[in-house]
Image (cartoon, grey):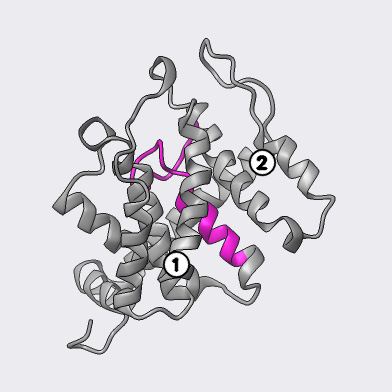
Amino acid sequence: CERENLSIAELAWQNEVYLHGEQELTRRLDAIWSAMQSCIEQGLKEKGLLPGYLAVTRRAADMAERLAKFDTAEVSNEWLQAYAIAVNEQNAAGMRVVTAPTNGSAGVIPAVLMYYLVIENHYAGEKEIKQFLMVAGQIGSIFKKGATISAAMGGCQAEIGVSSAMAAAALCELMGGTPEQVLVAAEIAMEHHLGMTCDPIGGLVQVPCIERNTMGAIKAIHAAELA
């Protein structure tokens, strides 16, 4: 990035266009964000119990109903958590999600991006969405190649930690961060997940997995701001 005087998203975009072509790259990014949006929207509507003997009650829809009574700016963190829970309740129910980088951590990245679009920057659009996804993908790739994104191998830090680092880096670039600051954001998010084990009750990706996505999303925002 320093040599070419490019941001991480710009460098990633050029590499991916070379490999796949701009039309195909745009189609794939649009498909990813469309699936993430759908997950949030459906998750904020569905009520009832999640599958499995734990009989976990869905919470995202009730949260959304309560939060709708307030000014969005007053309850921005609560909306962030509702987005993350909505996605992972969909995952726990066997619905279609985007692995980012895994299914159990699928709520962090869409929640942070939706938070940015709805709460932080109402003027953001297609350009910023693609920028966010390009940076997040690059950071996830570094973790996958250099360590692991498997909870079975690296504990939940390999899932929620990585997803939080991906979201932190992406948000940092949207906030104007340099490539160095973007990587620092990823590092801050990861270091505060180190040592987290993967211990879902009964082997179901429900408790504590769903709530961990809200924690990862909040840490991602803090990490981006700190960087």
Compared with residue 77, is residue 88 higher up or lower down, i.e. above or below? above
Residue holding disc 1: 224
Q: Residues within 10 Å of mark 2 (few under 14, many from 20)?
A: many
Splitting the image into 4 quarters, where does residue 9 fall? bottom left
The C terminus is located in which quarter? bottom left
Disc 1 or disc 2, which is closer to the eye? 1
Q: Secondary structure at mark 2?
A: loop
Q: Which residues are magenta?
A: 95-117
Residue 65 point in image, percent of width and height = 78, 42
Three-letter code, disc 2: Leu
Residue 46 point in image, percent of width and height = 67, 32
Splitting the image into 4 quarters, where does residue 205 fall? top left
Residue holding disc 2: 44
* In-front residue for pair 35/55: 55
* In-front residue for pair 2/39: 2
In the picture, measured across the screen, residue 146 lies left or right of residue 162, that is left
In the picture, measured across the screen, residue 45 lies left or right of residue 215, that is right
In the picture, measured across the screen, residue 115 lies left or right of residue 68, that is left
Label 1 vs label 2: CA separation? 26 Å
Q: Residues within 10 Å of mark 1 (few under 14, many from 20)?
A: many
Compared with residue 89, is residue 55 higher up or lower down, i.e. above or below? above
